[in-house]
Amino acid sequence: MLAYLVSGVLFILALRGLSSPATSRAGNRYGMLGMTIAVGTTLVTHEVASLPEIIGALAIGGGIGFIIARRIAMTDMPQLVAAFHSLVGLAAVLVGWAAYLNPEAFGIADVVAQAVPHASNIIALGSNSSDPAAMTKVFEESLRMAQLKAEAPAPAIMLQSCIELGLGIAIGAITFSGSVIAFLKLAGKMGGAPILLPGRHVINLGTLLAILGLVAYFTQDQSLWVIGLITVLSFAIGFLLIIPIGGADMPVVVSMLNSYSGWAAAAMGFTLHNTAMIITGALVGSSGAILSYIMCKAMNRGFLAVIAGGFGAAPEAGGSGAPKEQRPWKRGSAEDAAFLLKEAENVIIIPGYGMAVSQAQHALREMGDVLKKEGVSVKYAIHPVAGRMPGHMNVLLAEANVPYDDVFELEDINAEFGQCDVAFIIGANDVVNPAAKSDKSSPIYGMPVFDVDKAKTVMFIKRSMGGVGYSGVDNDVFYMDQTMMLLADAKKMVEDIVKSLQH
């Protein structure tokens, strides 16, 4: 128990460390150490069917995870996280089914003799008696108990375990199927646009109520069809909940699924009587829920509204919904950008997913270093939902050794754009779109955005004028008088700007 307590404290320290890029490495170490202690303690204190098999499984799984983590590109990290969430959910489902099929092995079974309590009492009395009639009664009851055990399909599961088992399987199945949809959308294998089913709210609510009703009924009837139907409906509702959510809400979805995976692990911890799983699952579930709330607040959206198919779910966006390539705009070159940047006093850089795709963060940091040598103040502005997952841009900038003191969140830097000489936007779109403030028909209306339109000069790097943001909304910033469009691959354009600055 003490070892589990130590691992729980380490998990809390890990979450604290991961709250800041400066302490994230230490946070990861705390988390790994805590998990090592928890797994080792479980193997030592619990009966294990085959220790070599478990060690082999740990080696295979750990090896696969290590190889994937080493090879995966930072641009693919969001879909990798979604894929890992799906595995956690599936593991919860499999553990739940294993416990249902063999409750005695998990310590959650009621003894069959409890169904005939008088039999054990008669046996106890008869064994201490020399009365032939009593002995005959003992023999008859022994035969009846043996027959009951032979005829019973499975030992009865305790009431509280039925609830834990049902909820664990349901949450795990929802996590698995929802994470699969999130993975497909983030990986571009499925369109980012929301898929709106007719009557989806009624279908979703009805399915959720049916799952809860079946979990309650499972405490009275532990038939195979009940637990099977809970599993099937939970897999279905996972798909139904995520497909109506648009691509602009994917950061919230990733955070939400992270929370689900934690609650699924906690529920299975009760089933397995494992304190470490309960602590870890509760920490992951609660921290994921808090992060989801923070993300929704950053987008000025209600959590329930997002789950029900929040912004990005409108079939048509009015006003700014379609690209407006016929509107006049100004195109610039790397030399033009270098001249304006060198003459500026204050530059604010706003990175987005396009920077991640082109892997331009190292070139961007080099550009910032060159400008600093010229006496230019350089800051980086990070929107809470920039990229495809929370903290995506922070991780990329940290990878490029951008000083933490130069990185600012939206609420800390947004007021500075009025005094900013150059707002340098690289691969971002929705987070600088003024339609979020002015166009009530826009699917991103109400989301806090950077006030780049107040800057003296705006430089916007994107591949072409034909593309729009992940939410599918055109950006009026493209066509402002002070905006210079730098159309090229982000990394190539920044490298060319650096060369021009150096010469």
Image (cartoon, rainbow, N blue to C red):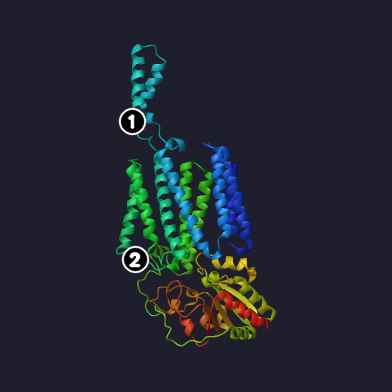
Mark 1 residue element: helix
Q: Identify the residue shown where x is 63% and y is 63%.
A: 22
Q: Which mark is residue 196?
A: 2
State the residue at coordinates (55%, 63%). 73
In the picture, the quarter occupied by the C terminus is bottom right
Q: Earlier in the sequence, mark 1 or mark 2?
A: 1
Name above or below for residue 104 compared with residue 204: above
Task: In the rendered view, tell whether residue 401 sits above or below residue 321.
Answer: above
Tell me which residue sits at (50%, 66%) in the image: 388
Q: Nearer the viewer, residue 122 or 435?
A: 435
Q: Nearer the viewer, residue 280 or 497?
A: 497
Within the image, what quadrant is residue 153 found in? top left
**For the N terminus, which image quadrant?**
top right
Q: Quadrant of residue 424?
A: bottom right
Query: Counting other residues with Cα less than 10 Å from the Cα at mark 2, is it few (<14), some (14-19), or many (20 or more)?
Result: some
Q: Is residue 4 visible?
A: no
In this rendering, would 161 be left or right of 59? left
Image location (x, y in percent) of residue 320:
40, 79
x and y percent of residue 213 in the render? 33, 49
Is residue 117 visible in the rendered structure shown here?
yes
Tell whether 127 sits left or right of 358: left
Q: Position of residue 349 (x, y in %)?
A: 58, 76
Q: What's the distance in space between the residues labelled 1 and 2, CA to CA?
A: 49 Å
Which element is circle 2 on? loop
Look at label 1 and name its amino acid: Glu
Q: In the picture, residue 246 is in which quadrant? A: bottom left
Residue 49 versus residue 284: which sits nearer the camera?
49
Tag on residue 151? 1
Q: Amino acid at mark 2?
A: Leu
Q: Nearer the viewer, residue 226 or 409?
A: 226
Q: Position of residue 214 (x, y in %)?
A: 33, 47
Give the residue at x 50% y 51%. 282
